[in-house]
Image (cartoon, rainbow, N blue to C red):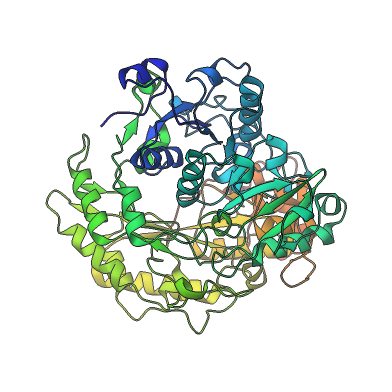
Amino acid sequence: MSFLPISREDMRNRGWEQLDFIFVSGDAYVDHPSFGPAILCRLLEKHGYKVGIIPQPDWKNTVDFARLGKPRLGFLVSSGNLDSQLNRYTAAKKVRHQDQYSPGGKSGYRPERAVVVYSKMLRKCWGNDVPIIIGGIEASLRRFAHYDYWSDKVRRSILMDSEADLLIYGMGERQLIDVAAQLHQGVEIHNIQDVQGTCFKVPDFDYIWDYKAIPSYEEVKVSREKFAQAFKDEFLEQDAFRGKKLAQQNEDWCVVQNPPALPLSVEEMDEIYDLPYERKWHPIYDDMGGVPAYKEVEFSITAHRGCFGGCNFCAIISHQGRIIQRRSDESILREAKLLTGLPGFKGYIHDVGGPTANFHRTSCDEQLKRGTCHGKQCLSPDACNHLVVDHSDYLGLLRKIRELPGIKKVFIRSGIRFDYLMRAKDNFLEELCEHHISGQLKIAPEHISDRVTRIMGKSRKDIYMRFVNRFMAINKRLGKKQFLVPYFMSSHPGATLEDAIELAVFIKEMGYHPEQVQDFIPTPGTLSTCMWYSGINPLTGERIYTAKKPEDKAMQRALMQYWLPRNYSLVRKALQKANRQDLIGFGPKCLIRPERKQGDVGNKAHKGNYKRKKDKKV
């Protein structure tokens, strides 16, 4: 095994004069199956293509973009594992100082809107002679006209802004191999219009047939109602089996989306994860401190893809889809054995899972025949009658891994969907507590207001509390001191100041002291972002309130950490604004103490308001 070429010298060492494909990536080059560019390049290599990578090129000139020469078949462009705007900015639109996918964890190695910048630089360097194919999470979520939080405007399709020839959305393996085969056969890139999971552009609707037109870019940028309608059409057709071809006029071009790619079979998933990865970052990063994101997945295993949880703020449905795609136990066991022989392995596998660890099978037995239900979620607001809750295959897999020589412990650190778990009749939670937790289990109730969780696509408070009580009872029976670390979100669409106060009171009652608070970020392509921008739930037509003013958002965020001295003024203002002065005082239910009066320096009881409390977990 060896790393894929990143220089002319690497090409010469392989005896190659020209590459078939060149992958331009916003991430540092890590040859590991948790990194999209590595998967796609290794898969192309497996199918006989010569592939090279240009990781994190200097976008200020064309030198790096010419480094590997002109590819025979095309350039592949991705911003990396994250949208480049999300990678660069916080929810408050402040520049992040760290980039986990760059050498040394330092920021500044990729431009804003990396897909657009890279594609335009390639055009400047090579003109229109070489096909440019964009993909990855940034391209997937921006394939139609979309709201961009960081510029606070509706932008046209990234296929237009980037001047690319073709857009691959979703995980991309099947689409890329199909496109590569057609290019190899001499088909012009502009004539490749039949591959599921791709978007292309034509002058107008007369060039296509059997499609559903959605409101145009010109319409959605001036009408929030039209924006919501366009999103609804996109969202409901996001299915490989029943989805329709969609078309949206974007100024002088019509952007056409074919239905999503069909789910990968078990054999196809095995092929992808059995490829000969180096499983480390490229040696050029050794003196720069390596790539931090790699350390998070070095000894982890991806068991499946997809998620039917239906969280409205999550982009997985638009990228990986709702249908679970899993690997065989044999493939996963091969990888587990491989990990035991890697340098630095100490007997601990850090994770075996996916977007949601305990979604190891399709939500019902019909999905691989007819697709997902139109306009209906599997778990929210209530579980579907056809939902199959079964952890048996997953439990069997975990038991097999635990028995392998050299493995001391197998942890589960992917998300656990506790509402699905609570419907199970098996002993999954018992085995989870006994064998697969390292003292803490991270879960994401996100909120406890039933009205807000309904809008989020999350479960109700009573389900969460039943899970908490069961978790505590099991650990008490096992004699283990293990804790839940819940994650909550502030300022999600639908969350009012009163809801934020309800959450703060709950946090106090439970003894939680979250060290980090996630403010909702309106990332492209999610249902929650559509609600945030349009003020409308596109699926129901319901009008949705959203806290958008900086002070309103700051108050909701501060309430979740009400005990911190720096938040005192904001919390007090929030409670006064909501007429909840009953929570200001010295009683056990109060969030804060009364404001210190000038000269009142001897009030020892009052000082308790500023004292950092010791963290308490459930």
Name which residue lies at 61% across and 35% down. Answer: 115
Q: Is residue 569 above or below residue 53?
A: below
Is 257 left, or right, of 224 in this rendering?
A: left
Q: Nearer the viewer, residue 550 or 504?
A: 550
Residue extending furthest right? 222
- Residue 272: percent from left, percent from top: 35, 49
Residue extending furthest bottom? 385
* Residue 587 shows up from this direction: no
Placement of the C terminus among the 4 image quadrants: bottom left
- Residue 403: percent from left, percent from top: 15, 59
Q: Is residue 261 above or below residue 13?
A: below
Name which residue lies at 62% across and 20% down. Answer: 125
Placement of the N terminus among the 4 image quadrants: top left
Q: Nearer the viewer, residue 199 or 141?
A: 199
- Residue 306: percent from left, percent from top: 47, 60
Residue extending furthest front? 186
Name which residue lies at 26% across and 55% down. Answer: 332
Q: Nearer the viewer, residue 448 or 87?
A: 87
Q: Is residue 592 above or below residue 339?
A: below
Is 538 left, or right, of 9 in this rendering?
A: right
Q: Nearer the viewer, residue 88 or 140?
A: 140
* Residue 575 shows up from this direction: yes
Question: Residue 509 lies in what quarter of the image?
Answer: bottom right
- Residue 504: percent from left, percent from top: 61, 60
Name which residue lies at 31% across and 18% down. Answer: 13
